[in-house]
Amino acid sequence: MSLWEYVACVEGYNEAHGSKSHGSGGKSYTDEDLREMGIEGF
């Protein structure tokens, strides 16, 4: 899964579930966290 695909999934989930927050106030992931989740291209 690329970084773009991950962000698209999160945005789609938030839109479908009525999230009103569009800011970046969520958890900040380190490069190692992303690598462990299989996110590429960061």
Image (cartoon, rainbow, N blue to C red):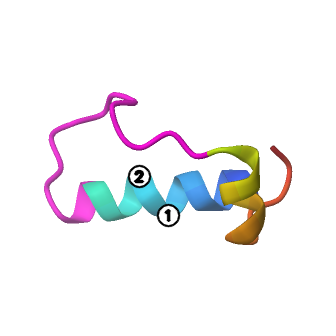
Q: Which residues are magenta?
A: 15-29
- In terms of secondary structure, where does tag 1 sit? helix
The image quarter in which residue 35 lies:
bottom right
Q: Can residue 14 be found in the magenta stretch?
A: no
Determine contact: label 1, label 2, CB under 8 Å: yes
Magenta stretch holds residue 27: yes
Seen in the image, is 1 located left or right of residue 25?
Answer: right
Identify residue for label 1. 9
Vertical side of 17 occupied by 29: above or below: above
Kind of residue sitting beneath label 1: Cys
Q: Report the predominant secondary structure element of the magenta stretch.
A: loop
Q: Position of residue 28 (x, y in %)?
A: 50, 39
Q: Which mark is residue 32?
A: none
Looking at the image, can residue 1 be seen?
Answer: no
Q: Residues within 10 Å of mark 1 (few under 14, many from 20)?
A: few
> Can you say which quadrant of the picture contains the N terminus?
bottom right
**In the image, is residue 35 above or below residue 4?**
below
Instruction: For mark 2, give the secondary structure.
Output: helix
Residue for point 56% across, 52% down: 7
Residue 2 location in percent, x, y?
77, 61
Q: CA distance from mark 1 to mark 2?
A: 6 Å
Q: Is residue 27 above or below residue 33?
A: above
Query: Is residue 28 left or right of 31 when viewed as pictured?
Result: left
Where is residue 31? Give x, y as percent.
75, 46
Q: Is residue 40 left or right of residue 1?
A: right
Please give the name of the residue rendered at 75% of the width and 71% of the height, measured from the top-left corner.
38
Q: Quadrant of the C terminus?
A: top right
Q: Which mark is residue 11?
A: 2
Q: Label 2 amino acid?
A: Glu
